[in-house]
Image: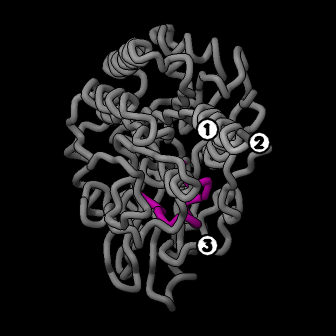
């Protein structure tokens, strides 16, 4: 009799435990600037932000680029610590290249020094999945989610949503409790047409309608009220044009230097005996940009501790572009009207954070939050311990939770 009671109690506790593991869907809208929500064209997103939690903006890490910030969101670390210091960069000791779009390098786990949330969750027995996210398709098995899709830029958006809904319909033991999703639309249209164009407004509306579709599909499988939906963006966007270009290579004519970084910011590695000389020359010509020695970069950027970062760092004034000869030619031949990667304190670089679900407060507004704090927030939702070496702080964001 006692044995039967014990078995019943054990089974009940197991059922109770499985029911208490929350569900979180983390959705990224690449390049969705913080104020895109204020244009009166996002009824579905408005419902989430008005009924759930709504931050004024989401402050990215520097540089405000796609891969560094997506990885900061899921690791709670600054790029200087998690290793993805730009979309494209070089290991100066081996000359190996990490490059967005290069499937070999982006799937090589040696570049990723942080522990992504899906790794932390899996170590704690929580099944995870990713429908596209930088770092989610590395070849090392234990560093990936249990379920993942290899990135396919032109994969239809509704197919991505249908894929996630299919995962949620799996039997409980196979079903992921944490899912990340990625949509590039507002980044692509923001770059091409600029953040104040009719085309970007159409892109904003397109993503809003996708959220409407997603909510309908979640409701069909009785998940709408039991899942926490967090919608974030990696960075914002600002207007650029070909009248605001500075060719740094012209200034450094005659010097043998290596260039890194991408238009809003640039890193430079001169010959060792010429670092001070090149720095002084750039300082004398400082106009619409700031130049720093790596060791003297203001601490707020958190961008000086990684060995792959070059000795000199230039940060352009918002809307200006720093180029060398080759990138100058490419920029003049392109029709890009928007960019990001600038000082992460500039509000044009800020993204969004809104959410709704059983673990999140209702009708709650707050000011700007930092993207490195999302990882410890996720750990708190799932009641697991974060890594001890992160830069994020739970106390800056846990008030979003019930």
| 37 lies above or below 150 | above
- Which numbered mark, 3 or 1, is in the foreground of this view? 1
In this view, the residue farthest toward the front is 1
Instruction: Give percent across and percent down for residue 157.
Output: 28, 27
For the N terminus, the image quarter is: top right
Q: How many labels does the image show?
A: 3
Residue lying at 73% horizontally and 38% vertically, measured from the top left? 397
Marked residue nearer the N-terminal end (3 or 1):
1
Select label 3 or label 2 by which is in front. Answer: 2
Estimate the spatial distance between the alpha carbons at disc 3 and disc 1, rounded to whole Å. Answer: 51 Å
- Kindly indicate whether the residue at mark 1 contacts the one at mark 3 (C-beta within 8 angstroms): no
Q: List x then y, in percent, for residue 239.
A: 43, 33
Cβ atoms at labels 3 and 2 below 8 Å apart: no
Q: What element carries label 1?
A: helix
Element type where label 2 sits in the image = helix
Residue 239 in view (yes/no):
no
Report which quarter residue 209 is drawn in. top left
Label disc, if present, on residue 396 of the rendered structure: 2
Find residue 75 and report its horizontal and vertical position in percent: 56, 55
Report which quarter residue 204 is drawn in.
top left
Tell me if I can see residue 96 in this picture: yes
The residue indicated by pointer 1 is 11
Is 209 a magenta residue?
no
Which of the two discs, 3 and 2, labels the residue nearer the N terminus?
A: 3
Magenta stretch containing residue 85, yes or no? yes
Q: Is residue 400 above or below residue 364?
A: below
Q: How crowded is mark 3: few (under 14 residues within 10 Å), some or many (20 or more)?
A: few
Q: Which residue in the structure is indicated by mark 3?
A: 305
Q: Distance between the residues labelled 2 and 1?
A: 38 Å
Most foreground residue, 206 or 117: 117
Q: Say which label, 2 or 1, has the lower sequence index.
A: 1
Q: Which residue is drawn at 41% across and 44% down?
A: 129
């Amino acid at each position: 009799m006692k044995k039967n009671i014990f078995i019943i109690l054990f089974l009940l506790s197991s059922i109770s435990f499985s029911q208490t593991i929350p569900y979180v869907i983390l959705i990224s809208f690449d390049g969705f600037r913080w104020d895109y929500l204020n244009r009166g064209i996002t009824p579905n997103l408005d419902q989430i932000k008005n009924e759930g939690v709504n931050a004024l903006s989401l402050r990215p890490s520097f540089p405000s680029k796609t891969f560094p910030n997506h990885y900061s969101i899921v690791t709670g670390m600054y790029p200087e610590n998690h290793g993805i210091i730009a979309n494209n960069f070089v290991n100066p000791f081996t000359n190996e290249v990490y490059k967005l779009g290069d499937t070999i390098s982006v799937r090589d786990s040696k570049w990723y020094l942080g522990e992504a949330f899906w790794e932390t969750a899996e170590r704690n027995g929580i099944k995870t999945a990713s429908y596209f996210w930088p770092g989610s398709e590395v070849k090392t098995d234990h560093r990936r989610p249990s379920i993942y899709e290899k990135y396919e830029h032109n994969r239809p958006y509704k197919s991505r949503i249908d894929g996630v809904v299919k995962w949620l319909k799996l039997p409980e033991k196979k079903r992921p409790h944490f899912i990340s999703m990625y949509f590039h639309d507002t980044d692509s249209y923001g770059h091409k047409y600029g953040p104040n164009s009719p085309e970007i407004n159409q892109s904003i509306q397109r993503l809003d309608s996708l959220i409407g579709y997603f909510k309908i599909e979640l409701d069909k499988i009785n998940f709408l009220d039991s899942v926490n939906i967090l919608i974030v963006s990696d960075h914002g966007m600002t207007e650029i044009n070909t009248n605001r270009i500075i060719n740094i290579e012209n200034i450094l004519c005659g010097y043998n230097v290596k260039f890194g970084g991408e238009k809003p910011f640039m890193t430079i590695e001169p010959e060792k005996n010429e670092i001070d000389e090149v720095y002084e020359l750039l300082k004398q010509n400082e106009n619409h940009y700031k130049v720093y020695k790596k060791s003297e970069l203001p601490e707020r950027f958190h961008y000086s501790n990684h060995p792959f970062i070059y000795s000199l760092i230039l940060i352009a004034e918002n809307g200006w572009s720093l180029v060398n000869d080759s990138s100058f030619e490419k920029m003049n031949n392109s029709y890009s009207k928007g960019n990001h990667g600038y000082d992460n304190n500039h509000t044009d670089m800020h993204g969004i954070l809104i959410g709704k679900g059983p673990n999140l407060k209702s009708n709650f507004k707050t000011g700007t939050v930092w993207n490195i704090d999302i990882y410890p927030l996720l750990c708190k939702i799932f009641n697991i311990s974060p890594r001890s070496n992160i830069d994020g702080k739970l106390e800056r964001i846990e008030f979003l939770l019930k």
